[in-house]
Structures are given as C-alpha cells and as structure tokens.
Amino acid sequence: MIKSKIKFLVFAFVFSIAISCGQQKRYITYQVKQGESMRDIANRLDVRTKDLLRLNPDVGRRPDANTTIIIPNPKFKGATTSNNNVEESVTEEEVTPVEETNSTEEVVENENTEQPKDTIQVVRITYEYVTHTVQPKETVYGITKKYEISKDELLKLNPEYPTLKDNLLSIGQVLKVKATETKTFVSLEEDLKNHVTHEVQPKETVYSITRFYNITKEDLILLNPDHPNIADDYIDVGEILRIRTIENKLETDNKKFYEDIIDMDEEETIDIAFLLPFKADEYTNTNAKDVFKENVLANMVTDFYMGAEIALDSIKAQGISFNAKIYDTGNRDEKVSELLDNDALEDADVIIGPFYSDKVEEVAKGARVPVIFPHYSKNQGKFSSSKIIKTEADTETHTNFLVSYLKDSYNGENIFIVGDETDDSNKQISTLVSGLKRHDSILEIHVLKPENGYIKKERFTDKMPEGSHNWIIITSIDNVVVADALNSMVVLPEGVTAQVYAVEKGAAYDKMDNNKLARINFSYVANNYTDENAEETKAFNRKFKDRNKTIPSDYAVKGFDITYDILMRLASGKKLSDTFDEGVSIRLENKFDYDKKLFGSVSNKGLFIVKYNKDLSLQRLK
C-alpha cells in the first residue's frame, strides 16, 4: 500500500459578504438535519442558495442528514440571519476561515459590481489518496474487501480504469482505494495563475471552447463552479474560464483560438475562383450514373463542390458579399494554362484549386493571389511559392504531432516502433526515436522490422515484462507488416497490455476488422475528426441531404470547411496570410493551424489523434 499525494482540485467561489471583524470567524460548520435542503438552510441564513453551494462544491442541493457543510457565521459582524436555530449545530473549530483584515470598511456583495480578484476567495478542495499496486492473482473483489470499500466506490475513485467494471486488472496497476479531503482558501487571482485559462470571445460557445481544448463539458463545469450557466450552454464575453491545471498543461494550450470577425466595407466583395477538373466535355454523351460509377475522381470533385456550395450559402447568410466563379479545368487540369493566358483569374482574390499538384506552381506563378491546394499529395513537399496554401498536413507533420502527444502522455510504457526498409518508414522511425528520447524518462525504444518477410509475435512478447503496458507505433504501410503487428497484439501474456498507434491510417488498416482494431485500442493521427452529436454537424448533414439526396462524404465536408474558413478569414478585412497569425480554426471536421515560413509554401499543422473505442465509436485523444 502506497500513500501518495495525488491531488485533484475542485474550486468554488466564496464572496466576502463583509470585511469588518473582531476575532470572530467568518465561516463555521453546520450539521445538516433530516429533511433539510440547501435552499432551506440558505433561506434561514438569508443568503443565496447558489452562494451556499459555492461554499460547498462537493455537496448537492439535498444533502444527507448529518452532512457537515460550511456556512457564514451568524454571529460574525455584518452577517445577517433570520433564524438563530442554525447556531445549535455549528462548530467554529472545524473550518479554516478566510484570512481576516482589521479594516472597518464594509463591502457588501453586489451581483452588478465586479469585485477585484484578490478580494474573492476560492475554496480549494484537495484529495489525498491511498493507493494500491495490483499484485499477481489479485482480484477486484479481493481489493474491495481488503480496503472495506464497494466496487462502485472503487470505480468512482478510478474512472481512468473502466475495465474494473468487468473485473479486469493489470499487474502493476496503481488503484486509488481511499480519499481524504482537505479544504483551503486562496484568492481568485492566485487560483487563476494555477490554471490554463481562456477568456471568452464574441461568438464563442461552450461547445467551441471544449472542442478547441479537447475537454468535456463536464470538465469545464467542474473546474468553473463560479460559472453555473455553463450547464445551460451560456457564457458571457470576457469571462475567464479554467481549462485545466498548470500541472496538466499541454503544448497545444499555447495556441490561440481564431475569432471569426466580419469587417468589410458595405461595397466590398470577395472574388473567389474554383479550379476543378469536372471534365464535362468528356461526359457530354455519358449517362450521369455511368459518370460516377467507380470513378473516384468524379466523385471527389463533385462532392467537394457540393460541400463548397453550402459554405457559400452560409457565408451569404451572414451578409458577406462575394462573387464565385467555377472553372472546369478538364482532364488533369489541362485547361489551366488557357485560363491563365486569357487572364480569367485576374480579378480573383483567392483561388481554390487546381486539384493536380503539377499544376499548382503554374497557377501560383501566373496569379497574384493565394492559391489553396485542397487535398493531400505526396508531391506537395516540392511546392516553393509562398502563395500556395496546403490544407492537409504532410507525413513529417503527422509524425511530429504523434511524438508530441506521446511525450505528454508517457507514464513508463514499454515502446516498440514497427517499420520496414522503405525510405518513408525509416525517416519516420528516425523522427520518432529522436523525438521520444528527448523525454528524460524514455531511455529504450525497440525497433522491429520484418525478417524473412514477416514479424514473429515472439519478437514483441519476449520484450514485454510481466505487468507492463506497451506502445506499438507503426510506420509501415505494408499490408503484411501492419497485419503482423496488429494480430500480435490481440492476445498477450497475462497482465500485459498494449495500445497500437499509427502515424497515418492507410489502406492496410481498412483490411482489418474494426472489432480487432477496437480490441487493441488502435489510435492514429488523422486529418479530420467528426463529432456526430454536434449541432453544426447535424445541420450540415440535413442541409446536404435535402439538397443532394445523399449523405455527405469526407470530400463534401472538406469542400465546406476549406471554403468557409478561407472566406471567413478574408471577411475580416485583413490579408489572408495575416489571419494565420491570429489563431487556429476548427470547422465541421477539419482543423486549420497554418504555419507561415519566411520562404516556401504555407503548411497546415491542424491534426487530431483518434482512438477506436470498444463500441466502435471514435474518440478524440488530442
């Protein structure tokens, strides 16, 4: 049994009702009587129920009889109560008071008056845990009996281990088995310094903030009991919200949230040109169904434009004036040169397209405006013009993004990297090894490559100590190598667990059963992530289906996101490149975190890390 100070902080505001004093204590404890609610007690004290709840963030509105709570001292100078019966059950010695002052000035709380941060007190509740390290042959039942707790209590203390519900343990797993609570008072100013914070901007919502920082609404509510309206999805511009404690700060917390601001003159219009290879001339005498049957390009281009159309509708609805011109660039964008020679793009403020990478430099050279390359190409690393904006991250960015996440998450895992002898795989292996070893605690990394065409399972398990948790990072896109690595993780020695990561989820993973991917906690770096429950996503899906009688593909969403993001940034009245310095935007399922360099094209570093859950749903890890 190990006793460790694993601290979990919950906060609530305590407003100073009066600051005149002798030696009386401002706050005392009170024992709740049978049938009393927090409202009943607040009414007798002549204070607001929500202030009483803020003093007692771990107590609900209907506490059990004999629960000890903190209340304002009815005897304290300046405090008012309408009934002295509450004094019968109070004990002054049991509570730490707010620091007293000798000032005789009385400051009465006023909801319409903002108080200085150093006069507002915060109750900090610290939990000190007793922990237990799981030994061989131990069971959930045995542990609960040993510490005289119920299984439900064990689950509540250890939400990070949901498999406890199924009585599953891992040797070496550290479980919290008992919690001791301590309450202290600190100033709001000090409290905010101990947190990553976010100041609410115009148009921001609870959903957009939780999505940006990848936290749940419940997390936001728990950390901000002084903002109870979060529960109703209401926040005010200028409010300072806690996101997470400084100890848990992530590298991405330094990013700014791009704010959509429309600042155009009434007569101003944005001219946008789309260069898309519809190849309409080739399909003049072809049935529409035959055009799209097994024609990947035709589906990609058409879906992209259908998504862009909805983005144009949304932009128009916000009062933004634009002219959109759509050009069919023909087979392999063969008509691009003709468009440039005829000055067809001369009036454009921005160009989305062309689709083919070998035509992008030609457009950038012939046009005087930003050129948006709308999807990924393995050749995009060769782009040199500063006018070119790449909307999808390259493989090196994927690899570095995974390194950053793993370094933040590392907790003693045993690390394997699986690759092959291709140049791309070897480059990724080198980046992963050098990046991960910058972490002070990562000393050894096992690199496995095929021998005689495959990788034996024993090459993994022989290096997996009993009770270890292992990370398997795959850089290869070879079908056999990927299958060997995944299949080896399905059944492991008793007490050994593993999580598999991929730098990219390529075609090799589409050949694997999704249930198998879920079983091994498969996680990967992704260009996009969809929250199907988001109102914005539901609205887009409905609108797309009503207009096109089908559900949107990834390319349709990409068409919407890219078009909407570019036009909203231009509607700010600033140069497009200048808006890239003002923050990261997340649209329906794509993130735009543009990185400007002194020379060369602009890159998008907006990525996610996504994990398969047991129910086959996808969870965003980063």
Image: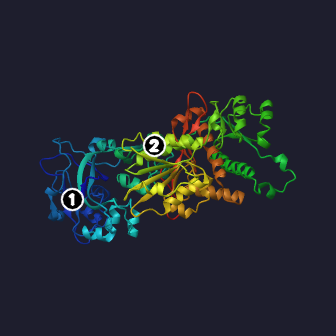
Tag shown at residue 95: none
Looking at the image, which is closer to me, 560 or 322?
560
Task: Please identify the quarter of the rendering in which residue 219 is found.
Answer: bottom left
Question: SS of the residue at dot 2?
Answer: helix
Viewed as shown, does residue 558 lie left or right of 366?
left
In the rendered image, the vertical position of residue 576 relative to residue 479, given as above or below: above
**What is the spatial separation of the Cα atoms under label 1 and label 2, in whole angstroms?**
49 Å
Q: Quadrant of residue 572?
A: top right
Q: Farthest top residue? A: 598
Q: Earlier in the sequence, mark 1 or mark 2?
A: 1
Q: At which x and y percent is residue 454?
A: 56, 54
Task: Determine which of the numbered discs, if any, sits on residue 252 in the image.
Answer: 2
Q: What's the residue at 31%, 48% (across, down)? A: 110
> What residue sits right under mark 1 in the picture?
81
- Residue at the extreme right: 285
Give, as a three-letter code, the residue at label 1.
Thr
Q: Amino acid at mark 2?
A: Thr
